[in-house]
Image (tube, rainbow, N blue to C red):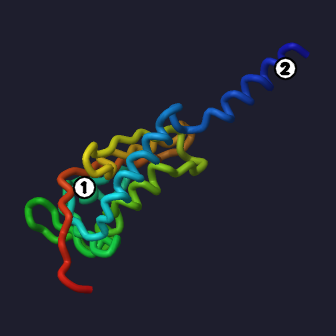
Amino acid sequence: MRSVLLAMVFLGTTACSGIFEPDEMKEIRRAQALWESKHIDDYDYVMRASCFCDPGVYQWATVEVRNDKVVAATLLDGTPITGAGLTYRRTVNQMFAAARSSDDWIDNVEFESDPELGYPVKVVLTAKKNIADGGVSYDARDLVRVMIATR
């Protein structure tokens, strides 16, 4: 009976701990509030993804976001990204959504943000040990607001 009780206590505490460190969700919310306070929907930034996917995704690329949608991306050597390679490029809001994810396959989330603008500079989703070829990491830097004359 004592071992059953101990098992129930252990399972109860591990089930409630979730995939986030104690202050991590608070940091994600703080960073997102800072980002949203800037009202930036049109921007260029440099990002890459790292996952078990096409090798072109690993390369740093300048991503053009207009009206909160990825409209183009170019590798740093000037090569345009098209097709499937473009689908791995994310907006800042998509990176926040990934950081807040609590999908069943995720074991841990790591998050870092830009101190001035709040956008994510690193989002790492680590897959559970029993998930083959899982996990993804997004890195971002050098975000610049783009001023659009008219819409």
Q: Residue furthest right?
A: 1
Observer-nearest residue: 67 or 72?
Answer: 67
The vertical placement of 95 against 6, above or below, is below
Relative to 32, 11 lies left or right: right
Using the rendered view, name the quadrant where residue 41 is placed.
bottom left
Estimate the x, y position of residue 11 in percent, counting from the top left. 73, 29
Q: CA distance from mark 1 to mark 2?
A: 48 Å
Estimate the x, y position of residue 110 in percent, counting from the top left. 41, 39
Quadrant location of the C terminus?
bottom left
**Mark 1 or mark 2, earlier in chain:** 2
Estimate the x, y position of residue 118 in percent, counting from the top left. 32, 49
Observer-nearest residue: 31 or 75?
Answer: 31
Q: Residues within 10 Å of mark 1 (few under 14, many from 20)?
A: many
The vertical placement of 19 against 82, above or below, is above
Q: Residue furthest left?
A: 77
Relative to 100, 104 lies left or right: right
Observer-nearest residue: 55 or 111?
Answer: 111
Q: Which residue is mark 2?
A: 5
Q: Which mark is residue 47?
A: 1
Estimate the x, y position of residue 88 in percent, counting from the top left. 34, 62
Label 1, secondary structure: give it: strand
Instruction: Name the kind of residue labelled 2 in the image.
Output: Leu
**Residue shown at 34% from the left, 63% from the top:** 91
Instruction: Name the kind of residue labelled 1 in the image.
Output: Met
